[in-house]
Amino acid sequence: MFLEGKRALVTGSTSGIGLAVAQALHGAGAEVVLNGFGDEAEIAGLCEELGATHSGADLTDAAQIEAMMREAGEIDILVNNAGMQHVAPVEEFPVEKWNTIIALNLTAAFHTTRLAVPGMKRNGWGRIINTASAHSKVASPFKSAYNSAKHGLDGFTKTIALELAEHGVTANCISPGYVWTPLVENQIPDTMKARGLTRDEVINDVLLAKQPTKKFVQPEEIGALAVFLCRDEAQNVNGANWSVDGGWTAD
Ligand code: NAD
């Protein structure tokens, strides 16, 4: 239980990857603050399972992020994970979707980080882990906002890694390929439309076609890597962008 006494905030942790990361950090002894939307009873169940508290802050809104950070108190492990996707050709990309994706997938990490860093510096210890994506390294068509936000998140992570390097704080990205979560499931209908394909064709010829292993990544694999990044043995892993994509970006 090497994370006993540490407090972790995982954004977007009511579902998918964020939930698996929160469970893994809890399993290593951390006190966890959850964030995200969902069914109230289900969230209450998760809080009970993890002995966690929950903030329902909408991370596209800076004022709600500020309130969440005030309520959460000092954070030792900050996992910027909340994100969303929208698939459409650039000339049809809804402006409001662009703005929301940039706000949630990129700008929210700036706000949580700027608010968590003073406490981390005071304590001389901190871990900032940003869920980026294979799309922080390579692009796919019809995902202009998402690819832009994730490439930006990689740049942001490298910047803060340099700024915080002498303070016992590391900042890294974890970049999954396709992980079977609601985010992936929900983009199948739009991808069918944008590419004129059936559901099975999207799964096999678009999503898994990218992944040399031909398998979806499991959320628990991301949780395990996040726990490793919190270890003392990972104190010199800083400013890195770790692929967990079955070899996709090796191509
Ligand atoms: P998911 O849809 O299962 O979970 C998204 C989480 O974010 C949920 O908890 C949701 O409530 C929360 N959320 C959504 N909008 C929010 C908002 N405005 N404010 C606060 N919380 C909000 O998705 P996931 O697949 O687990 O994705 C998590 C992260 O992993 C995202 O950043 C995503 O881009 C990234 N990612 C996912 C995959 C994949 O294949 N699933 C691959 C690479 C990267």
Image (cartoon, rainbow, N blue to C red):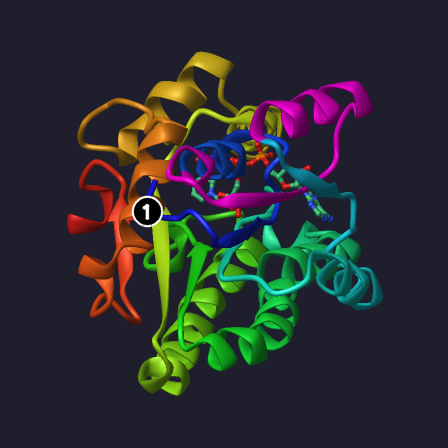
Instruction: Look at the picture and state if 32 lies above or below 78.
Output: above
Instruction: Look at the picture and state if 212 lies above or below 203.
Output: below
Which stretch is magenta? 25-50
For residue 85, say whether it is visible: no
Given residues 47 and 107, the one toward you in this image is 47
Q: Position of residue 165 (x, y in %)?
A: 32, 82
Given residues 83 and 91, the one toward you in this image is 83
User: As drawn, is 130 to the left or to the right of 99?
Assistant: left
Q: Position of residue 238 (x, y in %)?
A: 28, 70
Looking at mark 1, is its residue's CB closer than 8 Å to ligand 1? no
For residue 155, say whether it is visible: yes
How packed mark 1 is, by other alpha carbons closer than 10 Å (few <14, some 14-19, many 20 or more), is some
The quadrant of the rendered image in which ligand 1 is seen is top right
Q: Residue at x 59, y 38 (%)?
A: 13
User: As drawn, is 71 to the left or to the right of 175?
Assistant: right
Q: Residue at x 43, y 54 (%)?
A: 132
Q: Position of residue 15 (x, y in %)?
A: 59, 30
Q: Quadrant of the N terminus?
A: top left
User: As drawn, is 170 to the left or to the right of 247?
Assistant: right
User: As drawn, is 153 to the left or to the right of 3?
Assistant: right
Q: For the view shown, which residue lies furthest in the front direction?
A: 5
Q: Is residue 29 magenta?
A: yes
Given residues 11 and 77, the one toward you in this image is 77
Q: Residue at x 24, y 60 (%)?
A: 232
What kind of element bears circle 1?
A: loop
Total tally of numbered discs in the picture:
1
Q: Residue at x 27, y 22 (%)?
A: 215
Residue at the disc numbered 1: 2
Q: Position of residue 166 (x, y in %)?
A: 32, 86
Instruction: Look at the picture and state if 61 lies above or below 123.
Output: above
Q: Is residue 27 magenta?
A: yes
What amino acid type should be assigned to the residue bearing mark 1?
Phe
